[in-house]
Image (cartoon, rainbow, N blue to C red):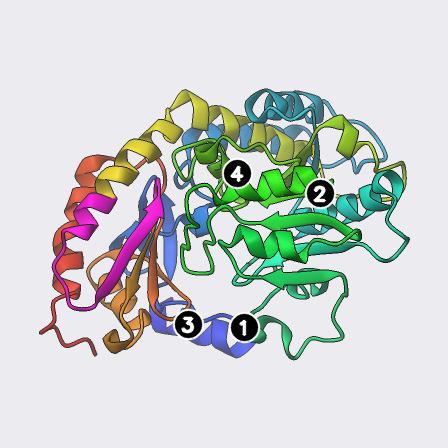
């Protein structure tokens, strides 16, 4: 079927809640995607950082095929032979004593919220149903009812009330605002070390350290959403490592499944994780053997292939190249590792049209918050491929270019 036919089917029979670019991808390998007409594109989004290992990594193809033939699901009513080795490896790499595997990122955030509330009631002594969690403006932690209740974005929440109570929203990047918002009922502070969906917003250096110190002084859990920033994306295993911060709770997802299978996890030491008791939480698919086999290999690929080091080295290099591109449209280039945002001036007319122009030149990126283009290629990318993007990006940002 043609591109037009496939788009028509999607629009006719699908819920209209997405605004994708009109490219219909048929296959992908490594950093490259190919549409139904055979045109080749460089993937500079990586499935919102779910594809750190690249598309269809052969090691993951092999593991998925082998495990799918053997055992895919037991539910947590029974044990399976893949969960233990996976969570052991996860502890070795993350430094946390325990983990609770779930499925989606939003589900893991919900899990972390439950853990924080239970800890507040059982350990801190907060009055039942009074626990509060402090979050930041511009956050994106998912789309469930409770998670959007913590959002400051009207589009995500206004028509979906009543909302879950128990959240305080403060400005991102201002540690003093968090200190001022803490009360005896505060259970946790939940932040992204870099706000990806918010427009690749990097907080001032030292912010995470300040927040963690404030939390420790106030007997409050510091919980960090590393779903997009973790597993090597920013040039460290966790983005918090850039400030030598180890939160009490870390949430991961996306690249944990290598783009093959949804799996997420909440990480914490036993003193926090063990407040959750038998029957209080669970998931039919959480920790299933297929997901665990894939996630174990996905973690090993990140380490074996030096993807964290590659993100650190090439991320710094690529940002330098992007900063050098002359354009009256660009306000700022920012990011860390291979999570980079190009913020455009209001006069540029929005980021979407520049993304469309890059698509026509074989580069797929995604706009965020109207005026930001996000660049997040798979961490397997090489310098030569990044260099090849500079000319088309320069052409798109020319002041004389007319984008239809």
Precedes in sequence: disc 3 or disc 4: 3
Pointers 1 and 3 in contact (CB under 8 A)?
A: no
Task: Tell me how far mark 1 sits from mark 2, CA to CA.
Answer: 41 Å
User: How far from the left and from the top, in percent, is residue 278?
Assistant: 89, 36
Q: Residue at x 76, y 27 (%)?
A: 270
Task: Tell me how far mark 1 sits from mark 3, CA to CA.
Answer: 14 Å
Q: Residue at x 30, y 62 (%)?
A: 343
| Labels in figure, total | 4
**Is 264 left or right of 394, judged from the image as shown?**
right
Secondary element at tag 2: helix
Q: Residue at x 80, y 54 (%)?
A: 131
Precedes in sequence: disc 4 or disc 1: 1
Precedes in sequence: disc 1 or disc 3: 3
The disc at residue 17 is: 1
Q: Which residues are magenta?
A: 319-339
- Disc nearest the viewer among 2 and 4: 2
Pointers 4 and 1 in contact (CB under 8 A)?
A: no
- Quickly name the residue at label 4: 209
Toward which corner of the image does residue 166 lie, by quadrant? bottom right
Q: Is residue 80 above or below residue 159?
A: above
**Is 166 left or right of 36, judged from the image as shown?**
right
């Amino acid at each position: 079927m043609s591109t037009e036919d496939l788009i028509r089917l999607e629009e006719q029979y699908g819920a209209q809640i997405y605004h994708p670019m009109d490219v219909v991808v048929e296959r992908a390998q490594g950093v490259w995607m190919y549409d139904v007409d055979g045109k080749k594109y460089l993937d500079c989004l990586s499935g919102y950082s779910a594809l750190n290992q690249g598309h269809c990594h052969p090691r993951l193809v092999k593991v998925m095929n082998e495990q799918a033939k053997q055992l895919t699901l037991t539910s947590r009513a029974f044990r399976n032979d893949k969960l233990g080795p996976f969570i052991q490896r996860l502890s070795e790499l993350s430094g946390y004593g325990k983990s609770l595997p779930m499925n989606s990122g939003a589900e893991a955030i919900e899990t972390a919220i439950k853990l924080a509330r239970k800890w507040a009631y059982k350990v801190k002594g907060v009055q039942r149903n009074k626990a509060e969690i402090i979050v930041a403006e511009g956050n994106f932690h998912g789309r469930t009812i409770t998670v959007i209740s913590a959002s400051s974005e009207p589009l995500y929440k206004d028509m979906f009330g009543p909302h879950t109570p128990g959240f305080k929203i403060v400005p991102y990047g201002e540690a003093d605002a968090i200190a001022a918002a803490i009360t005896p009922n505060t259970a946790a502070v939940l932040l992204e070390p870099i706000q990806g969906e918010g427009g690749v917003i990097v907080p001032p250096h030292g912010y995470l350290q300040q927040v963690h110190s404030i939390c420790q002084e106030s007997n409050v859990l510091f919980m960090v959403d590393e779903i997009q920033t973790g597993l090597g994306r920013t040039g460290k295993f966790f983005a918090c490592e850039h400030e030598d911060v180890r939160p009490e709770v870390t949430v991961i997802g996306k690249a944990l499944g290598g783009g093959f299978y949804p799996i997420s996890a909440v990480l914490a030491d036993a003193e926090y994780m063990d407040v959750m008791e038998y029957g209080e939480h669970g998931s039919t698919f959480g920790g299933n053997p297929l997901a665990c086999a894939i996630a174990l290999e996905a973690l090993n690929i990140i380490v074996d292939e030096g993807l964290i080091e590659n993100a650190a080295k090439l991320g710094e290099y690529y940002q330098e190249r992007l900063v050098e591109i002359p354009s009256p449209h660009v306000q700022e280039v920012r990011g860390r590792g291979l999570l980079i945002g190009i913020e455009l001036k209001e006069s540029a007319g929005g980021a979407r049209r520049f993304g469309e122009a890059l698509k026509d030149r074989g580069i797929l990126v995604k706009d965020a918050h109207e005026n930001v283009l996000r660049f997040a290629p798979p961490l397997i990318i090489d310098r030569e491929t990044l260099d090849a993007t500079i000319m088309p990006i320069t052409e798109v940002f020319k002041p004389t270019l007319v984008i239809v």
